Amino acid sequence: MKVKPTYKEIKKKINVNVFPYEVYVVLTTDVNEARKRRNKIFGETSLDHAIAMHSSLHTGFSYLFLPYNCTPWVLCHEVFHTVWEIMHFIGAELENEVMAYLMSFLMKEINKFGSTWK
């Protein structure tokens, strides 16, 4: 008999202090389940095979759903979606240096948080 693994998640809020924006990072054993548990926030989703996910309502916050074993390239991909969303939310042009700063800041904060998982 196959035993279903226990669902786990940890969550952290990252304030992007230079802009009025919050990023919630959810490290989880099941990205799709983590997103479904937030259907009250985002509404239903038809996605059920995502390896990672960015979700936003364009209202000043984003969620990043990441597996505990997230690779750097998957993390970078999802962080880029978040940076794009921040730039659009604040009404800024997609300026190279600002976007690079935001990418670095978020990658560093998520990496610090991810290293706390035991």
Image: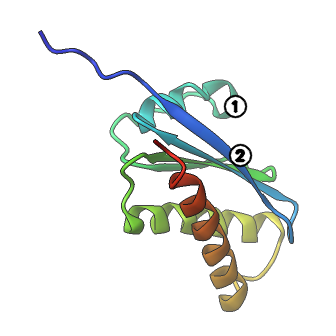
Image mark count = 2
Residue receiving disc 2? 57
The disc label shown at residue 41, or none: 1
Q: Position of residue 72 (x, y in %)?
A: 40, 67
Q: In this view, does 75 lie above or below 39?
A: below
* 87 sits left or right of 50 in the view: right
Q: Mark 2 Cα within 10 Å, few/some/many (few <14, many 20+)?
A: few
Residue type (three-letter) at the residue carrying disc 2 = Leu
Query: What residue is shown at x 67% (from left), y 73% (from top)?
Result: 105
**Residue at the image point whose x is 65% and y is 34% from the top:** 42
Q: SS for tag 2?
A: loop
Task: Estimate the x, y position of residue 27 in percent, counting from the top left.
Answer: 51, 43
Instruction: Tell me if 18 is positioned left or right of 22 in this view.
Output: right
| Contact (Cβ within 8 Å) of mark 2 with mark 1 | yes
39 versus 98 height, above or below: above
Label 1 crowd bin: few (<14), some (14–19), many (20+), radius 10 Å: few
